[in-house]
Amino acid sequence: MRQTNIILEAGRADKEYWRDLWRYRELFVVLAWRDVTARYKQTVVGVLWAVLQPLLTMIVMTLVFSRLAGLPSDGTAPYAIMVYAAMLPWQFFANSLSASGNSLLGNAHLISKVYFPRLVIPTASVITAFIDFLVAFTILLALMAFYQFWPNWRMLTLPFFTVIAFLAALGPGLLLASLNVKYRDFRYVIPFIVQFGLYVSPVGFSTAVVREKLGETLFLIYSLNPMVGVIDGFRWAILGDEANVYWPGLAISLVVTALLLWLGIARFRRTEKTCADVI
């Protein structure tokens, strides 16, 4: 009896590919839910890890930068709320970058067996980090109640900046995921990027302080870090009239975010066609 081999090619026309993403939306949900349950399985405090990590980091940064270094907050906003308003998008970015960057290697068994749009895997990882973001957001509300610091209408713009944070994490995540398939040492680079990014991003201090120290020109170069604009936007939305956005810096961060997203998708699509063989 003659054996027939059926080969499914991942390289399709763009229109068909994006339609496939919609057809595989159930797989997207399954992978995201699997990652959530796997993360908190057999843990002592479970989902509270999503709260403890940014909360403890906020406490340390508040003590170091406010109490010891004497740096000012934005306006009259409590320093702890200013820091936590930055910790929310930063932790989302860091978790998304780590999870999506290693997502293809972590699902090698699935990739090598069946065809589906591989873009589902790293995107589902970002969604998992977004769930942690929602859990950690409850602490922000508790902090506001504790300090009796209430937001104004700007809080309604927070979903917009959350989408920007999502895209800022997805672009580099796709790029690292594709590079990680061919160059396995990139899995050791990702933790370094996350740690280094925490120090160069305005998480523990106000962007106004950075702009005052660097000047307008250097601050625009500093804004090439897409998280500068994201953090600035989060503080503008959460702190209300106590915070201001430097709009040229935000515009640069948005352009860099769009560029990284385009590069990430383009590189990922090229890698996707052969990743089942390489991985």
Image (cartoon, grey):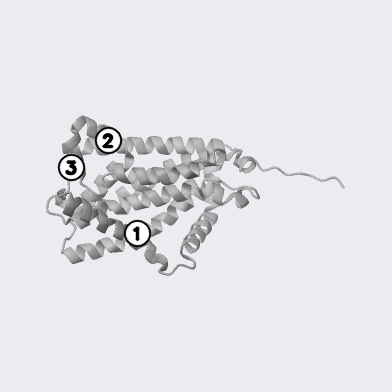
Residue 208's x, y, as percent? 18, 42
Q: Label 2, secondary structure: give it.
A: helix
263 in relation to 24, above or below: above
Instruction: List the residue tagged with mark 2.
Output: 222
The first of marks 3 and 1 along the sequence is 1
The type of residue carrying mark 3 is Ala
Q: Is there CB contact under 8 Å for labels 2 and 3? A: no
Q: Residues within 10 Å of mark 1 (few under 14, many from 20)?
A: few
| Quarter occupied by the C terminus | top right
| Distance between mark 1 and mark 2 Cα atoms | 26 Å
Residue farthest to the left?
A: 76
Mark drawn on residue 53: 1
Residue behind mark 3:
208
Q: Is residue 277 left or right of residue 40?
A: right
Q: Residue 184's x, y, as percent?
A: 54, 41
- Residue 215 falls in which quadrant of the image? top left
Q: Secondary structure at mark 3?
A: helix
Disc 3 to disc 1, C-alpha distance: 26 Å
Can you name the residue that lies furthest to the top here?
Answer: 217
The vertical placement of 100 against 264, above or below, is below
| Residue 40 x %, y % | 46, 64
Q: Position of residue 130 (x, y in %)?
A: 39, 55
Labels 1 and 2: the sequence-earlier one: 1
Which of 193 and 137 lies nearest the eye of the viewer?
193
At a point 52% along the width and 45% down the height, the residue shown is: 119
Disc 1 vs disc 2: Cβ atoms closer than 8 Å? no
Q: CA distance from mark 2 to mark 3?
A: 12 Å
